[in-house]
Image (cartoon, rainbow, N blue to C red):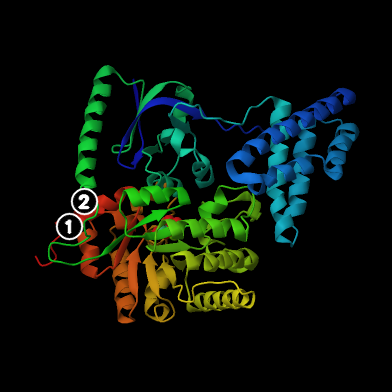
Amino acid sequence: MTIFEGKGICEAVAMGKISVIRKQKKEIERKIITDIKKETERFENAKDEVLSELEMIREKAVGKVGEEGAAIFEIHKMMIDDEDYNDFILNMIKDEKVSAEYAVFSASEKFSELFSSMENGYMKSRSADIKEISQRFINHLSGIDDNYEISEEKVIICADDLSPGETILLDKEKILSFVTAKGSLNSHTAILAKSMNIPAVVNVGDGFLSLIKDGDFAIADGFSGKFILNPDEETISYYNKKSEEYKERETILLSLKGKENKTIDGRKIKVFANIGDEESITAVKENDADGIGLFRSEFIFLRRDDFPTEEEQFSVYKKVAEEMSGGKVIIRTLDIGADKQADYFGLPEEENPALGLRGIRLCFSRKDIFKTQLRALYRASVYGDINIMFPMITSEKEVDEILSLCKEVRKELEKEGILFDEKTELGIMIETPAAAIISDDLAKKVSFFSIGTNDLIQYTLACDRQNLSVEKFCDTHHKAVLKLIETTIENAHKNGIWAGICGELAADISLTETFLEMGVDELSVSPSYVLKLRQKIRETDLSK
Ligand code: PEP
Ligand code: MG
């Protein structure tokens, strides 16, 4: 038995076999060859293999996401066949007598740079595709199998790290838990685990991957953050008992379904749920949330290889609105950037991505993408109570620009005779100290505030939420953070609008009473925390 200490996410325990995702990255050396004919043949054979592999993936993708969603693999096939790309590689093998791997790698560098320097957004995003097809080529040439398939049996996924994009692509039905060598508690990957209600353990340390193999039996304890490899009988029975206790607590919580979120002295507040995909609506309903306080729409973008069309987005927003049967649904516009990266955006690397082109800033620089999303949102607004929320606000000027873009979109739709709900409310996230400080002015321009404590904490305390080495400086109860939350709620009320909290702090029940005293109107948490929060609210007496 080996015990790894990490950080637990989502209070639950998983026991079962593990499946290891090993992402291989191979350094490509400039290797000189002597037999040009043989090297050219290696390249041509690999090309045939890559093409048939892409066709196989495309067929699978059609089954999962339809023809349109799978179109990217058709594009990849065409790129593999591109004459310039092929000529570059074959000439390099012939003229410079280098290995096919190195020639493909050089082609990847050259063409991806070329694409990313282009003005046109569509062409720019092809840069990531070039890198992807070239990597596939290199894998074939070097005999690396980078396609991981999860077995039919439910497993504990173990990996070095998982990006939010990789996490969202995992098939929830086949996962017991996931455990990563890296990762921090406030990362989006951790937040996703919570919203999927999957117990997870992150940051178990770099060495762990070399000590595990597929099929090993393990326990992932989301309470204590322990990952226990090959547990002994005593440990297994301890965790079986713990699971029973957990089930009993769940039964008590389930009895709170249908009950009000009301304190002993009669103060009522709304408890909403945070989601990242439409499938999580089931969990929202199962946990009896009053509405959706934060739909992180960027996850629609992260689970794909290309921009979702207006139609595709519309159908997701419509589905969410309809399934919530008139309940409030707050959809946040695209918050790509920082740790949430989609290669096809073709964004340049940044020194400080958390302080970079993310959220609304990116939307302003890519108005085509932003307006497509706004159109889809407005079109879906007639199917339920959709509210639109904007991330990463720092100034009144930004809000003015948003309002004028929304007006533009409404006018366009009107002209085209497309229906939308004119009363669709627009709100903003208060997740920068600047926004909290000027919340009195911002409140005059929008219909609601939702406080994003994850970023508010990171920016107030100057603590990168991804960086484990500064986690100890990240005091989530810091006076400065609480003061900014209080100011925001006060200013919202002074101006007649409501204010909620949708960051992870909303689920911290040691602060529930403080938030209620501040007058917060809504708390939005991962679906699995809704009933725990309801329980806490119902036990609170503000008159004491
Ligand atoms: C936040 O910053 O608190 C928030 C809810 O947004 P995200 O975690 O997606 O950045
Ligand atoms: Mg945020």
| Residue annotated with mark 1 | 538
Marks 1 and 2 sit apart, C-alpha to C-alpha, by 10 Å
Q: Is residue 146 above or below residue 477?
A: above
Q: Earlier in the sequence, mark 1 or mark 2?
A: 2
Circle 2 residues within 10 Å: few <14, some 14–19, many ≥20:
some
**Can you give x and y, in whole percent of width and height, for residue 305 in the image?**
63, 47
**Comparing labels 1 and 2, the label whose residue is closer to the camera:** 2
Q: Nearer the viewer, residue 537 or 159?
A: 537
Ligand 1 near label 1 (Cβ, under 8 Å)? no
**Can you give x and y, in whole percent of width and height, for residue 365 in the image?**
62, 67
Element class at badge 2: loop
Check contact, mark 1 vs mark 2: CB within 8 A: yes
Q: Amino acid at mark 2?
A: Leu
Answer yes or no: is residue 462 visible. Answer: no
Q: Amino acid at mark 1?
A: Arg
Ligand 1 near label 2 (Cβ, under 8 Å)? no
The quadrant in which the N terminus is found is top left
Tell me the residue at 39%/60% (across/down): 325
Q: Is residue 134 above or below residue 313?
A: above
**Which numbered circle lies on residue 32?**
none
Residue 308's quadrant in the figure? Answer: bottom right
| Residue annotated with mark 2 | 256
The quadrant in which the C terminus is found is bottom left
Element class at badge 1: helix
Q: Which quadrant of the figure shows ligand 2?
A: bottom left
Answer yes or no: is residue 466 visible. Answer: yes
Tell me the residue at 37%/80% (across/down): 440
Tell me the residue at 52%/30% (across/down): 150
